[in-house]
């Protein structure tokens, strides 16, 4: 009877841990680390193979579970320590998802080259120690689905899962960038614009990807400043140094605007050249105008805006109208006639808010809540 109870307890603990591990591994790989593994495979295979999110998550989870079965067959831990048979699988999961954002500059396992084998050696030592505690399974009070031994194993599994999440790549902006690049490759531009939409975190490369997606939908002048932006005008075009893509061919960005040039040029010089040459496409104009806005060069913005747009409320993108209102308040002698009473009232309210709050940080946070999607906010706080 005691032998049957022991077997039943072992089966219960194994089932609980197996279900928890498989669910965690699959969801973690499919929902959170899919883009990271995509770029890792893309770089390591020189673009020759493609990572499938669903198949990859299933296969990796299956292999890691088979690894656990092998560890269990060798160690035969007491029930109290059964969750630790998943330690090598969890450790391997952490290693393969600890992908550097600079993987395109050269792949390296880094500290894992000595940490991974060291941890496995320590694990082997613990295996020997745990075998000496097999008498702990004889306690009949710890048998069943809701026994103390089951809860201890669940706690150990949760701790290991938290460690995996901390050790692996958790760079939020890098995740955003890879997700955005994946959607761009699939021409899913609406999805690109939803990536990290409510986050304040960004970098120059993410700014470039968002600008490209907005331009594809002809919304660059309408919605660019609804996002947090980094890097100024230089972030509009890839330079393969500070502004780069890992999955997307950056030539596509230049071909969308006009064509690549052989000699390196500053972004605004390139955009100006494209708008004035026969090679420039429709997108070049909005890229140039938004470049001037990013650099806060309202004088150049107005000068080139007159060349390419009718200054009417009906056709002018929202951010261009916001910039004109700002320009008119700064240059009353050179004011551009524009009739937009709603925006004019909003700008007056924005100025009133800035005057009411003397503390810069408090003012910035308050202004972001109400006007964070306007060019005015970027001009004063960006």
Image (cartoon, grey):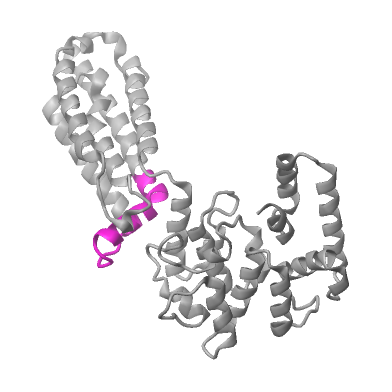
What percent of the width, then of the height, locates residue 101? 38, 52
- Characterize the magenta stretch by its predominant secondary structure: helix
Quadrant hosting residue 285 = bottom right
In this rendering, position of residue 307 left or right of residue 114 = right
Image x and y of residue 246, in percent: 38, 62
Q: Residue at x 58, y 49 (%)?
A: 199
Quadrant location of residue 331? bottom right
Farthest residue, direction left: 74
Magenta part of the chain: 26-54
Please report the residue visible at 65 percent of the width from the left and 61 percent of the height from the top: 225
If the image is split into quadrants, where does the N terminus sit? top left
Asked if the magenta segment contains residue 33, the reply would be yes
The relative height of residue 237 versus residue 36 in the rendered view (above or below) is below
Q: Residue at x 54, y 67 (%)?
A: 236
Q: Position of residue 130 (x, y in %)?
A: 18, 17
Q: Is residue 1 in sight in this rendering?
A: no
Compared to residue 176, the image places residue 45 above or below, namely below
135 left or right, relative to 299:
left
205 in the magenta segment: no
Point out the image quarter for the C terminus: bottom right
Residue positioned 79% across, 67% down in the render: 327
3 w.r.t. 212: above or below: above
Which one is nearer the viewer's eye here, 185 or 19? Answer: 185
Task: Classify 86 as above or below 57.
Answer: above
Does 168 sit left or right of 82 as displayed? Answer: right
Decide which of 334, 205 is in the foreground and name it. 334
Asked if one can make out residue 108 in the rendered structure from this viewpoint, the answer is: yes
Question: Observer-nearest residue: 23 or 37?
Answer: 37
Q: Nearer the viewer, residue 234 or 200?
A: 234
């Amino acid at each position: 009877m005691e032998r049957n109870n022991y077997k039943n307890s072992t089966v219960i603990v194994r089932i609980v841990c197996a279900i928890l591990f498989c669910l965690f591994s699959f969801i973690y790989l499919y929902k959170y680390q899919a883009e990271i593994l995509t770029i890792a495979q893309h770089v390591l295979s020189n673009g020759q193979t493609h990572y499938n999110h669903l198949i990859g998550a299933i296969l990796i989870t299956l292999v890691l579970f088979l690894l656990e079965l092998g560890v269990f067959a060798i160690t035969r831990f007491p029930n109290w320590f059964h969750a630790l048979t998943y330690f090598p699988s969890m450790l391997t999961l952490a290693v393969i998802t600890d992908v550097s954002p600079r993987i395109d500059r050269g792949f390296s396992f880094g500290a894992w080259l000595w940490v991974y084998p060291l941890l496995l050696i320590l694990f082997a030592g613990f295996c020997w120690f745990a075998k000496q505690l097999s008498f702990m399974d004889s306690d009949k009070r710890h048998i069943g689905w809701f026994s103390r031994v089951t809860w201890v194993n669940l706690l150990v599994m949760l701790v290991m899962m938290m460690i995996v999440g901390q050790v692996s790549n958790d760079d939020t902006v890098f995740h955003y960038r890879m997700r955005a690049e994946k959607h761009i490759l699939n021409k899913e531009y609406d999805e690109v614009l939803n990536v990290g939409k409510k986050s304040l975190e960004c970098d120059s490369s993410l700014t470039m990807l968002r600008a490209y997606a907005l331009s594809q939908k002809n919304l660059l002048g309408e919605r660019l400043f609804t996002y947090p932006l980094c890097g100024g005008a230089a972030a509009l075009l890839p330079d393969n140094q500070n502004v780069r893509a890992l999955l997307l061919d950056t030539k596509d960005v230049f071909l969308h605007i006009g064509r690549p040039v052989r000699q390196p040029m500053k972004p605004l010089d390139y955009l100006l050249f494209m708008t004035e040459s026969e090679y420039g496409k429709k997108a070049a104009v909005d890229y140039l105008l938004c470049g001037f806005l990013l650099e806060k060069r309202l004088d150049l913005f107005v000068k080139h805006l007159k060349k390419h747009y009718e200054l009417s409320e009906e056709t002018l993108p929202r951010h261009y109208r916001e910039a004109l209102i700002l320009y008119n308040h700064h240059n009353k002698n050179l004011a551009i006639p524009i009739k937009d009473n709603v925006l004019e009232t909003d700008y007056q309210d924005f100025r009133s808010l800035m005057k009411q709050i003397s503390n810069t940080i408090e003012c910035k946070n308050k202004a972001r809540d109400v006007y964070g999607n306007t060019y005015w906010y970027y001009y004063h706080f960006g």
